[in-house]
Amino acid sequence: MKRILVTGGAGFLGSHLCERLLAEGNEVLCLDNFFTGSKQNIAHLASKPYFEIIRHDITFPLYVEVDQIYNLACPASPVHYQHDPVQTTKTSVHGAINMLGLAKRLNARILQASTSEVYGDPEIHPQPEEYWGKVNPIGIRSCYDEGKRCAETLFFDYYRQHNLDIKVVRIFNTYGPRMHPHDGRVVSNFIVQALKGENISIYGDGEQTRSFCYVDDLVDAMIRMMATPAGITGPINIGNPGEFTMLELAEKVIALTGSSSQLIFCPLPSDDPRQRKPDITLAKKELNWHPAVNLEDGLTQTIAYFRKLLSEA
Ligand code: NAD
Ligand code: UDP
């Protein structure tokens, strides 16, 4: 049995990861400041004897004893990370320094939840890990993009300077049950709008693309990455290479919900990437992993979750 710290454990991805790690027989310390996460996401785990909840902000140092750390704490939706951009950068940068310092003291293995946003508005398609990205350093997405880039830098400097056992995964858009209904991300927005019979908000012309990975596939890849031998550091892209325009996504959501919602076109937020699709050659090779859940099946599960959530509200 390992003692594992999951920062951001009460968030969307973190709660699924805690659930899987517990099911595999580990002791889990779930740390969160509950900015975007909720106790509801982990309520079903609270009574388990090997599950512990710590209310803490990772921009402050932390003293616990663990074998492994998954560092997920950071708001991930543009609406939430732009709400307090200074705190977003602090969470990525000070948070990484604090968690890396903890890992160094404990000689623990540490995994960073990085993001496809490190590629910015990419000129290379699909994006391989060698691509350095095209990121605006002073725009409204920069607090998140540059914060995550700096966190990667810190991880690799701790690796080179202190020989720390690091793992970095670059996560592409991931969706599923327990997404926040009002966090403004496209999958949750479209599903909630469709279920309420409201207009579906397409930003820009809707021709921009994203690749959507179902949460179970993502968690599987993160756990596989953590289990790789020391020296396999990444960064490794994790995502589903299926690529869809936002118009295609809206059509699928309307069809699967049976909604009569109409599309409305809204202004495109600045620096919104035109296209995004992971090259997962490395993940296939190093992790023996590929996504198993297609968009229709994943959306069906996610729609069922939101239908229940809205019926209880
Ligand atoms: P989320 O907002 O649901 O989860 C983030 C969690 O971190 C929340 O529970 C929040 O309360 C917590 N948190 C935020 N700041 C904190 C702080 N300073 N101290 C302690 N806790 C804090 O988002 P998510 O989708 O679950 O994302 C989890 C991680 O994965 C993030 O680091 C995100 O950047 C990364 N990621 C997610 C996606 C995606 O599509 N979901 C894509 C790329 C990267
Ligand atoms: N988007 C949209 N309607 C919405 C929310 C988002 O058309 O209601 C678009 C957004 O402009 C972007 C894409 O969907 O092009 C994905 O947005 P999201 O915020 O989910 O993720 P990110 O931009 O960080 O990849």
Image (tube, rainbow, N blue to C red):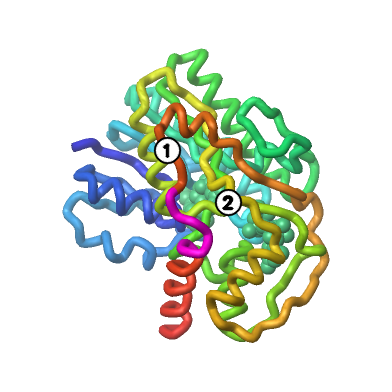
* Three-letter residue code for mark 2: Asn
- Residue pictured at 30% horizontal, 54% vertical: 19
Question: Tag 2, which secondary structure?
Answer: loop
How many neighbours does mark 1 have within 10 angstroms: few (below 14), some (14-19), or many (20 or more)? some
| Residue labelled 2 has its Cβ within 8 Å of some atom of ligand 1 | yes
The range drawn in magenta is: 292-298
For residue 166, above or below residue 179: above
For residue 81, above or below residue 27: below
Hey, which quadrant is residue 27 in on the image? top left
* Whole-percent x, y for residue 273 in the image: 75, 49
Residue 85 visible to the viewer: yes
Which numbered marker is on residue 173?
A: 2
Which numbered marker is on residue 262?
A: none
* Whole-percent x, y for residue 257 in the image: 54, 78
For residue 70, above or below residue 77: above
Label 2 close to label 1 by CB (< 8 Å): no
How many neighbours does mark 2 have within 10 angstroms: few (below 14), some (14-19), or many (20 or more)? many
Q: Nearer the viewer, residue 135 or 265?
A: 265
